[in-house]
Amino acid sequence: MGLLTLFFIQEGWAQNSTPTPDYGLSFASHEVTKDQRTSLSLTPEEPFTIKEDFEIRFDFSLKRLIDAYGYVLRIIANDSINIDLVSSPEHDDFHDLNLIIDNNPPQIHYDHQDIGLRPLQWTPVTIKFETRRKKLTVSWAGKTKTQELPFANLRTFRFFFGANDFGRFNTSDVPPMILRHIALQRVNDKTIQWDLRRHGVGQVYDNTNTYAAIAKNPTWLIDKHTTWVHAQQFTIARYPSVAFNSATGTVYATDKNHVYTYHLSDGQMHHARVRQGKPVYIDANQLLYIDATHTLVNYDLYTNVLSAYDFDHQRWQNSDTTYNLPNYWHNNKFYNSFDRSVYTFGGYGHFNYKNKFMRYDSASHAWIEVKTQGSIPPRYLGALGLTAAKDKALIFGGYGSESGKQELFPQSFYDLYTFDLKTHAIRKLWERKSEPGEEDIVFSNSLVVNEEDSCFYVLSFPKNKYENYIKLRKYSLSKPEWQVLADSIPFQFHDEHAFCDLFLSKATRQLVAVTSHKQIDQYKINLYTINYPPLSTTDVFQDTAPRIARASYYSILVFILITGTLATLAVIIFVRRKKKAPAVAVMTTATTTVAHDAARHAHESEKNIGTIYLFGGFQVFDKHGHDITGKFTMTIKELFVLILIHSVKFEKGISTTTLQEYLWPDKGDMSARNNRNVNIKKLRGLLEEIGDLTIENNHAFLQLALGKNVLCDYHIVSRILATETPLTAQTAETLLRFVKRGNLLPNIQTTWLDNFKSDISNRIIDVLLEYSQTLNATKDDRVLLEIADTIFHYDSINQEALVIKCSVLNKKGKYSLAKTWYDHFVKEYKTLYAESYPKTFDEVIS
């Protein structure tokens, strides 16, 4: 994070304007293994045929100047001649940057000092080919050098940045570079330009969506505007509070004995033990960093306390350690420079919501109610932020009631007000009424105002859930319009004992999300960052169908148009379709061909070739039918199951943040990321043994793509259960084939899996019971008994299954066996519920 932060600062940012989102392709270099290094091919299928003069241009930046050997650009002419732009800064026999033609010593070269190249600074590069004059010119940061091009009749050109695997010219030597604005300009022709801003999955189109370049192992800088990065996690003691210094990018956290500081610029975490004094001993205390006075203050309204912290002497002004019950949970706070006072608004305590603005009077050492022009309905869990001029406060949303009484119709508010810091006038800007059945959401303690774009940013989360997810929202300042940005942040919300806040770091051009939740007598603090301004995935993702993108195809198309030969067109379409890779279906709950697929899979499952079983226990067979379950360690098994189950149930799969929270919660972000990458690499190797099964990384979400030759029982069962039409005999047979094996992953006991187990168990039982109502007890006795036995796997005291089992057995003349089953059920019912089963055997079989 620190490396890219420096890059952001390099370009500068006027604090009163919205910065341009950072974009470009960052190349993984020698810091990773060879198969994880980055490549970008402008000619993934066929070379460009270029008979006239042309030039290729791009913006270039090195992330570091040492350990920076590698191929910036490799051009292959006529599939036989290499023209290489090579970074070699630590080689005595070469210069820092060299143009090597057909493996001859370079005539064109540059040293870093020649062009003023510094780490993380953009410089423009142009390579111009004048093929008829047999001349080649390189311009780097405005410094131009020319040499003879010792070849004639160059007609085709391939362009590779970083690594490539093209025949004998393949290389894995990649410099630690960043590229953007790649352009190919032919004489008297339109420029083909890849800005490397919007991109697809593994490919990026030029600005006309015509020419596709292929990227392997890409890191798109723009994605840092759509994805939260887990920056830090730490645990503090009682009486927690959090504040932020926007100018330096410093997070402050306090507990009863320490003051913690985390610096976004370098990722360093420090803590100092308080030598004298104490923060306010109250669970709902608040912390505020005052930019104007460079002061950290801790306060509580109920006890009339405001205490400043002395960084030099590590002491608080407050010495009172009396604990008081909070009366202003989740109040909002800000510093008013007009009267040099700390203000608060709202809060909750003792069954009442608050709506007063309070000011701390330093002369009387007391909180005083502010007389306002206008009012805001009482609330807490709302957001507040100041405008750039610090003359107005925006107050948005929250949960409360018009009367302030918790008993009288509490509700979520979705309204926006301004409070004038000078006149204390309140003005309502807009309000949106909640829709019937709409989930109540509440907001972070702070919001971030972006007046230039007439919007503000705020964190939101459902109020009535414990296992929660925070979403970043962008709201208009002028009307009730909003959109959800970025990915989600995990959050455990326990009302008073959980807290989240949002800050803008001007120092590092990032939004910072801080969450806190109680764990016994401690609090876990998590910090997340996202580059500013935040974007949605639709802002950066290229979703376009491939087009014919090579000169040869254009030539054929012209021929077609001239001759009107439809047969030729048909041939071309056929050829292009044949060239396409085999289809891979991302796992979804699509239901159009469930019956057909289910029957086919039912037959193929007998072979156990390329098969994954989750019901009855984890078991995997490779593409040859060999059982390779033993190759899955516990971590890789859980990693695989996490990605698989989330890919089936959720459209996007599982976020890398959630994955790290589940598997490596006690590790720092860097360590967790390394563990994740290593284990995913191992998992991908095992998936290749199974068959056409791949893990796709789409905007920090991992998704499993399942090919047609791989069978997964959980995938098939989920598709069948997702159908809106009732089961047929065919789909019921397939469903029973898999689910009668037993419960979902009975040998994996982990908290995150419980909800999935419960959900699919309930759905299996409901669907099978519904289907059983359509069957005849005499004709379909075998199926009914199988349904009953299967339901007992998931619910050992299911009364409907007992009725089915005993009734069918009784009608088949097996009265004693039916009675045995009944007695067994009654005994287990008594054990679990500590009461007798209410129905007699005769009532069950009647």
Image (cartoon, helix red, strand yellow):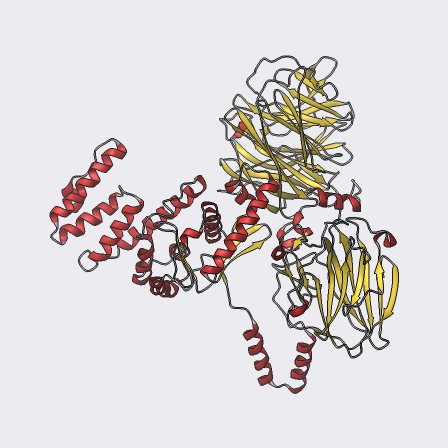
Kindly indicate the quadrant of the structure image that contains residue 311: top right
User: Is residue 586 something that shows in the picture?
Assistant: no
Decide which of 674, 735 is in the foreground and name it.
Answer: 674
Count of marks, rendered view: 0
Q: In this picture, is 136 found above or below 317?
A: below
Decide which of 765, 416 is in the foreground and name it.
Answer: 765
Decide which of 589, 97 is in the foreground and name it.
Answer: 97
User: Is residue 602 something that shows in the picture?
Assistant: yes
Kindly indicate the quadrant of the structure image that contains residue 88: bottom right
Residue 132 location (% of width, % of height): 84, 77
- Side (left or right) of 213 relative to 611: right
- Side (left or right) of 831 relative to 676: left
Residue 418 location (% of width, % of height): 70, 33
Residue 802 location (% of width, % of height): 22, 45
Q: In this picture, is 84 found above or below 285?
A: below
Kindly indicate the quadrant of the structure image that contains residue 136: bottom right
Quadrant for the N terminus in the image: top right
Q: In this picture, is 595 found above or below 795?
A: below
Residue 532 location (% of width, % of height): 70, 44
Q: In this picture, is 800 found above or below 522?
A: below
